[in-house]
Image (cartoon, rainbow, N blue to C red):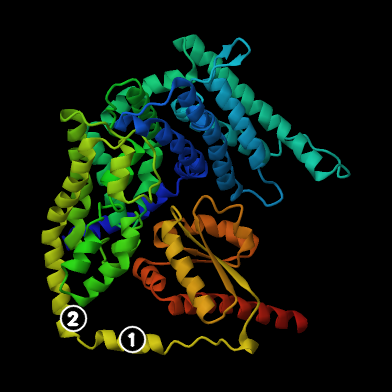
Amino acid sequence: MNNLIAQIEKMKPFFETVSRNKYLRAVKDGFIAAMPVVLFSSIFMLIAYVPNIFGFYWSESIESLIVKPYNYSMGILGLLVAGTTAKSLTDSFNRDLPKNNQINNISTMLAAIVGFLLLSSDPIEGGFASGYLGTTGLLSAFVSAFIVVNVYNIFIKNNVTIKMPEEVPPNISQTFKDVLPFAASALLLFFVDILIRNITGTSFAQAVIEMFQPLFSAADGYLGLAIIYGAMSFFWFIGIHGPSIVEPAISAIIFLNLDANLRLFQSGEQAINALTPGIQYFVATLGGTGATFVVPYMFMLLGKSKQNKAIGKASFIPTSFGVNEPILFGGPLVLNPIFFLPFILAPILNVWVFKAFVDFLSMDSFIYFLPWTTPGPIGLIFGTGLAPLSFLLAILLLVMDVLIYYPFFKVYDKQQVEKEQESASLVATETETNDDLVIAMNENEQSDEKNVLVLCAGGGTSGLLANALSKGAKEYNYPINSAAGSYGAHYDIMKDYDLIVLAPQVASNYEDIKKDTDRLGIKLVKTQGKEYISLTKDPKGALQFVTNLLKEDEEVDVHTDELIKGGI
Protein backbone atom coordinates (compact mmCIF):
# COMPACT_ATOMS: atom_id res chain seq x y z
CA MET A 1 0.00 0.00 0.00
CA ASN A 2 2.86 2.39 0.78
CA ASN A 3 4.25 1.78 -2.71
CA LEU A 4 0.84 2.61 -4.17
CA ILE A 5 0.71 5.89 -2.23
CA ALA A 6 4.23 6.72 -3.40
CA GLN A 7 3.21 6.18 -7.02
CA ILE A 8 0.09 8.28 -6.56
CA GLU A 9 2.13 11.13 -5.09
CA LYS A 10 4.27 11.21 -8.23
CA MET A 11 1.14 12.16 -10.17
CA LYS A 12 0.38 15.07 -7.85
CA PRO A 13 2.08 17.80 -9.95
CA PHE A 14 -0.05 16.86 -12.96
CA PHE A 15 -3.29 16.99 -10.99
CA GLU A 16 -2.28 20.30 -9.39
CA THR A 17 -1.75 21.72 -12.88
CA VAL A 18 -5.24 20.57 -13.86
CA SER A 19 -6.75 22.14 -10.74
CA ARG A 20 -5.10 25.48 -11.64
CA ASN A 21 -6.50 25.48 -15.17
CA LYS A 22 -7.88 28.96 -15.89
CA TYR A 23 -11.15 27.73 -17.37
CA LEU A 24 -11.92 25.17 -14.65
CA ARG A 25 -11.10 27.78 -12.02
CA ALA A 26 -13.31 30.36 -13.75
CA VAL A 27 -16.28 27.97 -13.78
CA LYS A 28 -15.84 27.15 -10.08
CA ASP A 29 -15.29 30.76 -9.03
CA GLY A 30 -18.17 31.91 -11.20
CA PHE A 31 -20.47 29.58 -9.29
CA ILE A 32 -19.07 30.63 -5.93
CA ALA A 33 -19.79 34.26 -6.76
CA ALA A 34 -23.38 33.38 -7.69
CA MET A 35 -23.99 31.17 -4.66
CA PRO A 36 -25.83 33.86 -2.62
CA VAL A 37 -28.45 33.89 -5.38
CA VAL A 38 -28.91 30.12 -5.15
CA LEU A 39 -29.17 30.16 -1.36
CA PHE A 40 -31.58 33.10 -1.35
CA SER A 41 -33.89 31.56 -3.94
CA SER A 42 -33.98 28.15 -2.26
CA ILE A 43 -35.53 29.66 0.88
CA PHE A 44 -38.69 30.48 -1.08
CA MET A 45 -38.93 26.97 -2.51
CA LEU A 46 -38.82 25.56 1.01
CA ILE A 47 -41.55 27.95 2.15
CA ALA A 48 -43.69 27.21 -0.89
CA TYR A 49 -43.58 23.42 -1.03
CA VAL A 50 -42.38 21.84 2.23
CA PRO A 51 -45.85 22.43 3.82
CA ASN A 52 -47.27 20.12 1.11
CA ILE A 53 -45.73 17.16 2.95
CA PHE A 54 -47.97 17.88 5.92
CA GLY A 55 -51.05 18.25 3.76
CA PHE A 56 -51.05 22.05 3.66
CA TYR A 57 -51.20 23.81 0.28
CA TRP A 58 -51.01 27.51 -0.41
CA SER A 59 -53.57 28.99 -2.73
CA GLU A 60 -52.38 29.52 -6.30
CA SER A 61 -52.13 33.28 -5.85
CA ILE A 62 -50.10 32.96 -2.63
CA GLU A 63 -47.88 30.25 -4.13
CA SER A 64 -47.22 32.43 -7.15
CA LEU A 65 -46.29 35.31 -4.87
CA ILE A 66 -43.92 33.15 -2.79
CA VAL A 67 -42.04 31.71 -5.78
CA LYS A 68 -41.65 35.07 -7.55
CA PRO A 69 -38.29 35.82 -5.84
CA TYR A 70 -37.12 32.35 -6.92
CA ASN A 71 -38.06 32.96 -10.55
CA TYR A 72 -36.39 36.36 -10.55
CA SER A 73 -33.13 35.05 -9.04
CA MET A 74 -32.61 31.34 -9.77
CA GLY A 75 -34.60 31.87 -12.95
CA ILE A 76 -31.79 34.00 -14.39
CA LEU A 77 -28.87 32.07 -12.87
CA GLY A 78 -27.38 31.34 -16.30
CA LEU A 79 -27.34 35.04 -17.15
CA LEU A 80 -25.66 35.90 -13.84
CA VAL A 81 -23.08 33.10 -14.07
CA ALA A 82 -22.13 34.24 -17.57
CA GLY A 83 -21.04 37.52 -16.00
CA THR A 84 -19.34 36.10 -12.89
CA THR A 85 -17.47 33.46 -14.91
CA ALA A 86 -16.27 36.11 -17.36
CA LYS A 87 -15.01 38.26 -14.49
CA SER A 88 -13.13 35.36 -12.90
CA LEU A 89 -11.52 34.37 -16.20
CA THR A 90 -10.62 38.01 -16.89
CA ASP A 91 -8.83 38.23 -13.56
CA SER A 92 -6.81 35.14 -14.51
CA PHE A 93 -5.81 36.58 -17.89
CA ASN A 94 -4.88 39.90 -16.28
CA ARG A 95 -2.19 38.21 -14.21
CA ASP A 96 -0.19 37.71 -17.39
CA LEU A 97 -0.77 41.19 -18.81
CA PRO A 98 1.15 44.38 -17.98
CA LYS A 99 -0.29 46.38 -15.12
CA ASN A 100 -0.86 49.36 -17.42
CA ASN A 101 -2.71 47.32 -20.05
CA GLN A 102 -5.35 45.24 -18.28
CA ILE A 103 -8.65 43.82 -19.51
CA ASN A 104 -11.65 45.63 -18.05
CA ASN A 105 -13.51 42.91 -16.11
CA ILE A 106 -16.68 44.99 -15.91
CA SER A 107 -16.75 45.23 -19.69
CA THR A 108 -16.22 41.48 -20.14
CA MET A 109 -19.05 40.80 -17.67
CA LEU A 110 -21.41 42.96 -19.74
CA ALA A 111 -20.25 41.45 -23.03
CA ALA A 112 -20.66 37.90 -21.68
CA ILE A 113 -24.22 38.67 -20.55
CA VAL A 114 -25.08 40.11 -23.97
CA GLY A 115 -23.48 37.12 -25.68
CA PHE A 116 -25.37 34.73 -23.41
CA LEU A 117 -28.69 36.34 -24.34
CA LEU A 118 -27.82 36.01 -28.03
CA LEU A 119 -27.09 32.30 -27.59
CA SER A 120 -29.93 31.40 -25.25
CA SER A 121 -33.00 33.53 -25.75
CA ASP A 122 -35.62 33.59 -28.50
CA PRO A 123 -37.37 36.84 -29.43
CA ILE A 124 -41.04 37.01 -28.50
CA GLU A 125 -43.59 39.78 -28.79
CA GLY A 126 -42.63 42.57 -26.44
CA GLY A 127 -39.30 41.07 -25.33
CA PHE A 128 -37.42 37.78 -25.28
CA ALA A 129 -38.07 34.30 -23.89
CA SER A 130 -36.67 33.35 -20.48
CA GLY A 131 -36.75 29.56 -20.80
CA TYR A 132 -32.97 29.19 -20.99
CA LEU A 133 -31.93 32.07 -18.76
CA GLY A 134 -31.77 29.89 -15.64
CA THR A 135 -29.95 26.64 -14.94
CA THR A 136 -30.79 25.26 -18.38
CA GLY A 137 -28.57 27.94 -19.90
CA LEU A 138 -25.46 27.29 -17.80
CA LEU A 139 -23.49 25.60 -20.57
CA SER A 140 -24.20 28.55 -22.85
CA ALA A 141 -23.08 30.87 -20.06
CA PHE A 142 -19.67 29.20 -19.92
CA VAL A 143 -19.28 29.28 -23.69
CA SER A 144 -20.17 32.96 -23.81
CA ALA A 145 -17.75 33.84 -21.01
CA PHE A 146 -14.87 31.88 -22.53
CA ILE A 147 -15.29 33.35 -26.01
CA VAL A 148 -15.72 36.92 -24.77
CA VAL A 149 -12.64 36.92 -22.54
CA ASN A 150 -10.44 35.35 -25.21
CA VAL A 151 -11.56 37.94 -27.77
CA TYR A 152 -10.83 40.73 -25.29
CA ASN A 153 -7.43 39.21 -24.53
CA ILE A 154 -6.48 39.21 -28.22
CA PHE A 155 -7.54 42.84 -28.69
CA ILE A 156 -6.02 44.22 -25.46
CA LYS A 157 -2.79 42.20 -25.67
CA ASN A 158 -2.18 43.43 -29.21
CA ASN A 159 -3.40 46.98 -28.51
CA VAL A 160 -6.19 46.75 -31.09
CA THR A 161 -8.26 49.47 -29.47
CA ILE A 162 -9.49 53.00 -30.02
CA LYS A 163 -6.87 55.24 -28.44
CA MET A 164 -7.85 58.62 -27.12
CA PRO A 165 -5.61 61.68 -26.50
CA GLU A 166 -3.98 61.94 -23.07
CA GLU A 167 -6.19 64.90 -22.21
CA VAL A 168 -9.30 62.69 -22.23
CA PRO A 169 -10.27 61.48 -18.71
CA PRO A 170 -9.32 57.81 -18.01
CA ASN A 171 -12.92 56.63 -17.58
CA ILE A 172 -13.85 58.00 -21.01
CA SER A 173 -10.71 56.52 -22.59
CA GLN A 174 -11.55 53.13 -21.08
CA THR A 175 -14.99 53.25 -22.67
CA PHE A 176 -13.53 53.71 -26.15
CA LYS A 177 -10.83 51.11 -25.42
CA ASP A 178 -13.58 48.52 -24.80
CA VAL A 179 -15.68 49.31 -27.87
CA LEU A 180 -13.82 47.13 -30.40
CA PRO A 181 -13.45 43.95 -28.27
CA PHE A 182 -17.03 44.31 -27.03
CA ALA A 183 -18.36 44.60 -30.59
CA ALA A 184 -16.17 41.76 -31.88
CA SER A 185 -17.17 39.31 -29.16
CA ALA A 186 -20.88 40.16 -29.38
CA LEU A 187 -20.89 39.86 -33.18
CA LEU A 188 -18.98 36.56 -33.01
CA LEU A 189 -21.54 35.07 -30.63
CA PHE A 190 -24.35 36.48 -32.77
CA PHE A 191 -22.84 34.66 -35.76
CA VAL A 192 -22.58 31.43 -33.72
CA ASP A 193 -26.27 31.76 -32.80
CA ILE A 194 -27.31 32.22 -36.44
CA LEU A 195 -25.14 29.29 -37.55
CA ILE A 196 -26.50 26.88 -34.93
CA ARG A 197 -30.10 27.89 -35.57
CA ASN A 198 -29.67 27.23 -39.29
CA ILE A 199 -28.06 23.85 -38.69
CA THR A 200 -30.22 22.51 -35.84
CA GLY A 201 -33.34 24.66 -35.99
CA THR A 202 -32.98 25.41 -32.28
CA SER A 203 -31.14 27.88 -30.09
CA PHE A 204 -27.54 27.24 -29.10
CA ALA A 205 -28.63 26.63 -25.47
CA GLN A 206 -31.04 23.86 -26.45
CA ALA A 207 -28.65 22.36 -28.99
CA VAL A 208 -25.78 22.07 -26.53
CA ILE A 209 -28.02 20.42 -23.91
CA GLU A 210 -29.22 17.87 -26.45
CA MET A 211 -25.63 17.21 -27.50
CA PHE A 212 -24.51 16.48 -23.93
CA GLN A 213 -27.67 14.63 -22.85
CA PRO A 214 -26.07 11.15 -23.22
CA LEU A 215 -23.23 12.33 -20.97
CA PHE A 216 -25.73 13.67 -18.42
CA SER A 217 -27.54 10.32 -18.38
CA ALA A 218 -24.30 8.37 -18.00
CA ALA A 219 -23.13 10.61 -15.17
CA ASP A 220 -26.39 9.99 -13.31
CA GLY A 221 -25.89 6.21 -13.45
CA TYR A 222 -24.19 3.99 -10.88
CA LEU A 223 -20.87 3.90 -12.76
CA GLY A 224 -20.90 7.64 -13.43
CA LEU A 225 -21.60 8.46 -9.78
CA ALA A 226 -18.82 6.11 -8.66
CA ILE A 227 -16.30 7.72 -11.01
CA ILE A 228 -17.28 11.28 -10.04
CA TYR A 229 -17.22 10.89 -6.27
CA GLY A 230 -14.48 8.27 -6.22
CA ALA A 231 -12.29 10.72 -8.15
CA MET A 232 -13.16 13.57 -5.80
CA SER A 233 -12.04 11.49 -2.80
CA PHE A 234 -8.96 10.24 -4.63
CA PHE A 235 -7.71 13.75 -5.34
CA TRP A 236 -8.32 14.84 -1.74
CA PHE A 237 -6.47 11.77 -0.49
CA ILE A 238 -3.28 12.89 -2.25
CA GLY A 239 -3.69 16.39 -0.83
CA ILE A 240 -5.37 18.17 -3.75
CA HIS A 241 -8.76 19.85 -3.32
CA GLY A 242 -10.85 17.32 -5.26
CA PRO A 243 -13.87 19.55 -5.95
CA SER A 244 -11.56 22.03 -7.74
CA ILE A 245 -11.00 19.41 -10.43
CA VAL A 246 -14.31 17.54 -10.48
CA GLU A 247 -16.95 20.21 -9.75
CA PRO A 248 -16.39 22.37 -12.87
CA ALA A 249 -17.04 19.32 -15.06
CA ILE A 250 -20.38 18.55 -13.41
CA SER A 251 -21.55 21.97 -12.19
CA ALA A 252 -23.98 22.50 -15.05
CA ILE A 253 -25.36 18.96 -14.77
CA ILE A 254 -26.06 19.05 -11.04
CA PHE A 255 -28.03 22.30 -11.21
CA LEU A 256 -29.91 21.20 -14.33
CA ASN A 257 -30.91 18.02 -12.49
CA LEU A 258 -31.91 19.93 -9.36
CA ASP A 259 -34.15 22.20 -11.42
CA ALA A 260 -35.63 19.19 -13.24
CA ASN A 261 -36.30 17.44 -9.91
CA LEU A 262 -38.15 20.46 -8.56
CA ARG A 263 -40.35 20.61 -11.65
CA LEU A 264 -41.09 16.89 -11.40
CA PHE A 265 -41.99 17.29 -7.73
CA GLN A 266 -44.24 20.27 -8.46
CA SER A 267 -46.10 18.26 -11.10
CA GLY A 268 -46.70 15.39 -8.68
CA GLU A 269 -44.08 13.06 -10.17
CA GLN A 270 -41.04 11.46 -8.57
CA ALA A 271 -37.83 13.48 -8.53
CA ILE A 272 -35.55 10.88 -10.12
CA ASN A 273 -32.25 12.63 -10.90
CA ALA A 274 -29.61 11.55 -8.38
CA LEU A 275 -26.70 13.77 -9.47
CA THR A 276 -27.47 17.05 -7.71
CA PRO A 277 -25.64 19.40 -5.31
CA GLY A 278 -27.36 17.60 -2.43
CA ILE A 279 -25.93 14.17 -3.22
CA GLN A 280 -22.47 15.70 -3.11
CA TYR A 281 -22.91 17.73 0.08
CA PHE A 282 -24.98 15.31 2.15
CA VAL A 283 -24.38 11.81 0.76
CA ALA A 284 -21.05 11.40 -1.05
CA THR A 285 -19.27 13.91 1.16
CA LEU A 286 -21.36 13.32 4.28
CA GLY A 287 -19.28 15.27 6.80
CA GLY A 288 -16.79 16.26 4.11
CA THR A 289 -14.89 14.50 1.33
CA GLY A 290 -14.41 10.84 2.20
CA ALA A 291 -17.80 10.65 3.96
CA THR A 292 -16.04 11.39 7.26
CA PHE A 293 -19.03 12.45 9.39
CA VAL A 294 -18.65 9.45 11.69
CA VAL A 295 -14.84 9.38 11.86
CA PRO A 296 -14.22 12.07 14.53
CA TYR A 297 -16.86 10.45 16.73
CA MET A 298 -15.06 7.12 16.37
CA PHE A 299 -11.74 8.77 17.25
CA MET A 300 -13.31 10.48 20.26
CA LEU A 301 -15.54 7.69 21.62
CA LEU A 302 -13.91 4.45 20.50
CA GLY A 303 -10.24 5.40 20.36
CA LYS A 304 -7.81 4.18 23.01
CA SER A 305 -5.04 6.45 21.77
CA LYS A 306 -4.84 9.75 23.67
CA GLN A 307 -3.86 11.52 20.47
CA ASN A 308 -6.81 10.10 18.53
CA LYS A 309 -9.22 11.03 21.31
CA ALA A 310 -7.88 14.60 21.32
CA ILE A 311 -8.14 14.86 17.52
CA GLY A 312 -11.71 13.53 17.65
CA LYS A 313 -12.74 16.07 20.29
CA ALA A 314 -11.17 18.90 18.31
CA SER A 315 -12.70 17.92 14.96
CA PHE A 316 -16.18 16.48 15.58
CA ILE A 317 -17.92 19.87 15.63
CA PRO A 318 -16.43 21.30 12.40
CA THR A 319 -16.79 17.94 10.63
CA SER A 320 -20.46 17.80 11.62
CA PHE A 321 -20.86 21.00 9.60
CA GLY A 322 -18.91 19.75 6.59
CA VAL A 323 -15.53 21.27 7.50
CA ASN A 324 -13.44 18.11 7.82
CA GLU A 325 -9.88 19.41 7.34
CA PRO A 326 -9.14 19.00 11.08
CA ILE A 327 -9.67 15.25 10.83
CA LEU A 328 -8.23 14.97 7.30
CA PHE A 329 -4.89 16.47 8.28
CA GLY A 330 -5.03 15.98 12.05
CA GLY A 331 -5.74 12.24 11.92
CA PRO A 332 -4.34 12.19 9.39
CA LEU A 333 -6.61 10.51 6.86
CA VAL A 334 -5.06 11.96 3.70
CA LEU A 335 -1.94 10.17 2.48
CA ASN A 336 -2.43 7.63 5.26
CA PRO A 337 -2.28 4.15 3.63
CA ILE A 338 -4.53 2.65 6.31
CA PHE A 339 -7.47 4.89 5.36
CA PHE A 340 -7.08 4.77 1.56
CA LEU A 341 -9.77 2.13 0.95
CA PRO A 342 -12.51 3.48 3.26
CA PHE A 343 -11.82 7.05 2.14
CA ILE A 344 -12.56 6.07 -1.49
CA LEU A 345 -15.13 3.34 -0.83
CA ALA A 346 -17.48 5.08 1.64
CA PRO A 347 -18.54 7.91 -0.73
CA ILE A 348 -19.14 5.45 -3.59
CA LEU A 349 -21.28 3.11 -1.49
CA ASN A 350 -23.16 6.07 -0.05
CA VAL A 351 -24.22 7.36 -3.47
CA TRP A 352 -25.10 3.86 -4.66
CA VAL A 353 -27.37 3.28 -1.66
CA PHE A 354 -28.96 6.70 -2.19
CA LYS A 355 -29.61 5.97 -5.86
CA ALA A 356 -31.04 2.57 -4.96
CA PHE A 357 -33.55 4.28 -2.64
CA VAL A 358 -34.55 6.54 -5.53
CA ASP A 359 -34.66 3.79 -8.18
CA PHE A 360 -36.18 0.90 -6.25
CA LEU A 361 -38.02 2.46 -3.31
CA SER A 362 -39.34 5.50 -5.25
CA MET A 363 -37.89 8.03 -2.80
CA ASP A 364 -37.62 11.56 -4.14
CA SER A 365 -34.09 12.70 -4.91
CA PHE A 366 -32.93 16.17 -3.87
CA ILE A 367 -35.33 18.94 -4.83
CA TYR A 368 -34.02 21.81 -2.67
CA PHE A 369 -30.65 23.47 -2.38
CA LEU A 370 -29.20 23.84 1.12
CA PRO A 371 -25.83 25.31 2.18
CA TRP A 372 -23.00 22.76 2.22
CA THR A 373 -22.38 23.59 5.89
CA THR A 374 -25.75 22.10 6.87
CA PRO A 375 -25.07 18.96 8.98
CA GLY A 376 -25.23 16.00 6.59
CA PRO A 377 -28.21 14.03 7.96
CA ILE A 378 -30.26 17.24 8.27
CA GLY A 379 -29.32 18.30 4.75
CA LEU A 380 -30.32 14.90 3.39
CA ILE A 381 -33.72 14.98 5.08
CA PHE A 382 -34.65 18.56 4.24
CA GLY A 383 -33.06 18.53 0.79
CA THR A 384 -35.32 15.67 -0.27
CA GLY A 385 -38.38 17.49 1.02
CA LEU A 386 -38.68 15.55 4.29
CA ALA A 387 -39.26 12.35 2.35
CA PRO A 388 -40.18 9.63 4.92
CA LEU A 389 -37.56 7.26 3.56
CA SER A 390 -34.87 9.92 3.95
CA PHE A 391 -34.98 9.50 7.75
CA LEU A 392 -34.24 5.81 7.35
CA LEU A 393 -31.59 6.51 4.74
CA ALA A 394 -29.77 9.02 6.97
CA ILE A 395 -29.47 6.44 9.74
CA LEU A 396 -28.46 3.70 7.29
CA LEU A 397 -25.67 5.80 5.77
CA LEU A 398 -24.23 6.64 9.19
CA VAL A 399 -24.27 3.00 10.28
CA MET A 400 -22.78 1.83 6.99
CA ASP A 401 -19.97 4.41 7.15
CA VAL A 402 -19.12 3.29 10.70
CA LEU A 403 -18.89 -0.33 9.49
CA ILE A 404 -16.69 0.70 6.55
CA TYR A 405 -14.27 2.77 8.60
CA TYR A 406 -14.23 0.74 11.83
CA PRO A 407 -11.77 -2.08 10.89
CA PHE A 408 -9.28 0.42 9.48
CA PHE A 409 -9.74 2.76 12.44
CA LYS A 410 -8.99 -0.10 14.88
CA VAL A 411 -5.73 -0.90 13.07
CA TYR A 412 -4.69 2.76 13.13
CA ASP A 413 -5.71 3.28 16.75
CA LYS A 414 -3.70 0.23 17.80
CA GLN A 415 -0.63 1.63 16.01
CA GLN A 416 -1.03 4.98 17.75
CA VAL A 417 -1.36 3.35 21.18
CA GLU A 418 1.87 1.42 20.58
CA LYS A 419 3.66 4.61 19.52
CA GLU A 420 2.42 6.43 22.61
CA GLN A 421 3.66 3.63 24.85
CA GLU A 422 7.09 3.78 23.21
CA SER A 423 7.41 7.53 23.68
CA ALA A 424 5.36 8.43 26.77
CA SER A 425 7.28 11.64 27.31
CA LEU A 426 6.58 13.06 23.83
CA VAL A 427 3.46 15.03 24.79
CA ALA A 428 5.14 16.61 27.83
CA THR A 429 8.15 17.62 25.74
CA GLU A 430 5.98 19.23 23.08
CA THR A 431 4.03 21.07 25.80
CA GLU A 432 7.19 22.45 27.34
CA THR A 433 8.42 23.54 23.90
CA ASN A 434 5.13 25.25 23.20
CA ASP A 435 5.24 27.00 26.58
CA ASP A 436 8.64 28.42 25.66
CA LEU A 437 7.09 30.44 22.83
CA VAL A 438 7.40 34.08 23.78
CA ILE A 439 5.70 36.91 21.94
CA ALA A 440 6.87 40.40 22.73
CA MET A 441 3.75 42.25 23.71
CA ASN A 442 5.21 45.36 25.30
CA GLU A 443 3.76 48.64 24.17
CA ASN A 444 7.11 49.77 22.80
CA GLU A 445 7.47 46.65 20.63
CA GLN A 446 4.04 46.74 19.05
CA SER A 447 4.05 47.63 15.39
CA ASP A 448 1.31 49.26 13.36
CA GLU A 449 -1.98 47.42 12.99
CA LYS A 450 -1.78 44.58 10.45
CA ASN A 451 -4.53 42.79 8.52
CA VAL A 452 -4.33 39.08 7.73
CA LEU A 453 -6.55 37.19 5.26
CA VAL A 454 -6.79 33.39 5.40
CA LEU A 455 -8.02 31.69 2.23
CA CYS A 456 -9.43 28.22 1.63
CA ALA A 457 -11.75 26.75 -1.00
CA GLY A 458 -15.10 27.57 0.55
CA GLY A 459 -14.46 29.84 3.54
CA GLY A 460 -15.04 27.20 6.22
CA THR A 461 -11.52 25.93 6.81
CA SER A 462 -10.02 29.42 6.62
CA GLY A 463 -12.33 30.47 9.45
CA LEU A 464 -10.62 28.02 11.82
CA LEU A 465 -7.25 29.76 11.55
CA ALA A 466 -8.74 33.25 11.36
CA ASN A 467 -10.63 32.61 14.60
CA ALA A 468 -7.54 31.21 16.33
CA LEU A 469 -5.54 34.24 15.22
CA SER A 470 -8.24 36.64 16.46
CA LYS A 471 -8.30 34.86 19.80
CA GLY A 472 -4.53 35.08 20.14
CA ALA A 473 -4.45 38.76 19.15
CA LYS A 474 -7.16 39.56 21.69
CA GLU A 475 -5.51 37.55 24.46
CA TYR A 476 -2.15 39.26 24.00
CA ASN A 477 -3.56 42.64 22.97
CA TYR A 478 -1.66 42.51 19.68
CA PRO A 479 -2.70 44.79 16.77
CA ILE A 480 -3.66 42.15 14.21
CA ASN A 481 -7.03 41.83 12.47
CA SER A 482 -7.82 38.53 10.76
CA ALA A 483 -10.51 37.51 8.29
CA ALA A 484 -11.50 34.32 6.47
CA GLY A 485 -12.25 34.13 2.77
CA SER A 486 -12.61 31.73 -0.15
CA TYR A 487 -10.23 31.51 -3.06
CA GLY A 488 -11.80 33.12 -6.11
CA ALA A 489 -13.81 35.62 -4.10
CA HIS A 490 -10.73 37.42 -2.78
CA TYR A 491 -9.56 39.48 -5.75
CA ASP A 492 -11.40 42.66 -4.84
CA ILE A 493 -10.52 42.62 -1.13
CA MET A 494 -6.94 41.36 -1.02
CA LYS A 495 -5.52 44.88 -1.44
CA ASP A 496 -6.72 45.66 2.09
CA TYR A 497 -4.44 43.05 3.71
CA ASP A 498 -0.78 42.87 4.66
CA LEU A 499 -0.53 39.07 4.70
CA ILE A 500 -2.45 36.30 2.97
CA VAL A 501 -2.26 32.73 4.29
CA LEU A 502 -3.30 29.86 2.01
CA ALA A 503 -4.90 26.83 3.67
CA PRO A 504 -3.58 23.43 2.45
CA GLN A 505 -6.54 22.82 0.14
CA VAL A 506 -5.67 25.86 -2.01
CA ALA A 507 -1.88 25.75 -1.58
CA SER A 508 -1.57 24.47 -5.16
CA ASN A 509 -2.73 27.92 -6.33
CA TYR A 510 0.27 29.61 -4.72
CA GLU A 511 2.01 30.52 -7.99
CA ASP A 512 -1.15 32.04 -9.47
CA ILE A 513 -2.07 34.20 -6.52
CA LYS A 514 1.56 35.24 -5.97
CA LYS A 515 1.34 37.22 -9.20
CA ASP A 516 -1.45 39.24 -7.60
CA THR A 517 0.21 39.66 -4.22
CA ASP A 518 3.56 40.66 -5.75
CA ARG A 519 1.82 43.33 -7.81
CA LEU A 520 0.14 44.69 -4.67
CA GLY A 521 3.16 44.31 -2.38
CA ILE A 522 1.43 41.79 -0.09
CA LYS A 523 3.14 38.95 1.77
CA LEU A 524 1.88 35.47 0.77
CA VAL A 525 2.49 32.14 2.50
CA LYS A 526 1.12 28.62 1.96
CA THR A 527 0.69 26.02 4.68
CA GLN A 528 0.86 22.25 4.93
CA GLY A 529 -1.81 19.97 6.40
CA LYS A 530 -0.61 19.17 9.93
CA GLU A 531 1.04 22.56 10.29
CA TYR A 532 -2.22 24.33 9.46
CA ILE A 533 -4.38 22.22 11.76
CA SER A 534 -1.96 22.63 14.67
CA LEU A 535 -2.13 26.41 14.21
CA THR A 536 -5.94 26.39 14.24
CA LYS A 537 -5.86 24.74 17.67
CA ASP A 538 -3.15 27.01 19.08
CA PRO A 539 -4.04 30.75 19.19
CA LYS A 540 -0.65 31.59 20.66
CA GLY A 541 1.17 29.58 18.01
CA ALA A 542 -0.97 31.12 15.26
CA LEU A 543 -0.10 34.60 16.49
CA GLN A 544 3.60 33.67 16.68
CA PHE A 545 3.45 32.25 13.13
CA VAL A 546 1.93 35.42 11.71
CA THR A 547 4.06 37.89 13.65
CA ASN A 548 7.23 36.12 12.52
CA LEU A 549 6.17 36.48 8.89
CA LEU A 550 5.25 40.14 9.29
CA LYS A 551 8.49 40.78 11.20
CA GLU A 552 10.47 39.44 8.24
CA ASP A 553 8.84 42.04 5.99
CA GLU A 554 9.53 44.83 8.50
CA GLU A 555 13.21 43.87 8.65
CA VAL A 556 13.43 43.96 4.86
CA ASP A 557 11.79 47.41 4.82
CA VAL A 558 14.22 48.72 7.47
CA HIS A 559 17.19 47.35 5.54
CA THR A 560 15.92 48.98 2.35
CA ASP A 561 15.48 52.32 4.13
CA GLU A 562 19.05 52.11 5.44
CA LEU A 563 20.38 51.49 1.94
CA ILE A 564 18.45 54.44 0.59
CA LYS A 565 19.70 56.73 3.39
CA GLY A 566 23.22 55.53 2.70
CA GLY A 567 22.90 56.60 -0.90
CA ILE A 568 22.94 53.12 -2.38
In the image, 56: left or right of 62? left
The dot on residue 431 is: 1
Is residue 232 visible in the rendered structure shown here?
no
In the image, 553: left or right of 31? right
- The quarter of the displayed image where residue 305 is located: bottom left
Say if 447 sits above or below 397 in the image.
below
Of residues 217 and 357, the one drawn nearer to the viewer in this rendering: 357
Residue 39 x %, y %: 46, 41
At label 2, which amino acid type do we have? Glu
How packed is label 2: few (under 14 Cα within 10 Å), some, or many (20 or more)? some
- The quarter of the displayed image where residue 269 is located: top left
State the SS at label 1.
helix
Residue 220 x %, y %: 27, 31
Spatial CA distance of label 1 from label 2 is 15 Å
Of residues 289 and 378, the one drawn nearer to the viewer in this rendering: 378
Residue 334 x %, y %: 27, 60
Give the residue number, with chain letter if any, for mark 2.
420
Residue 54 x %, y %: 30, 32
- The quarter of the displayed image where residue 121 is located: top right
State the SS at label 2.
helix
Name the residue at 29% across, 63% down: 316
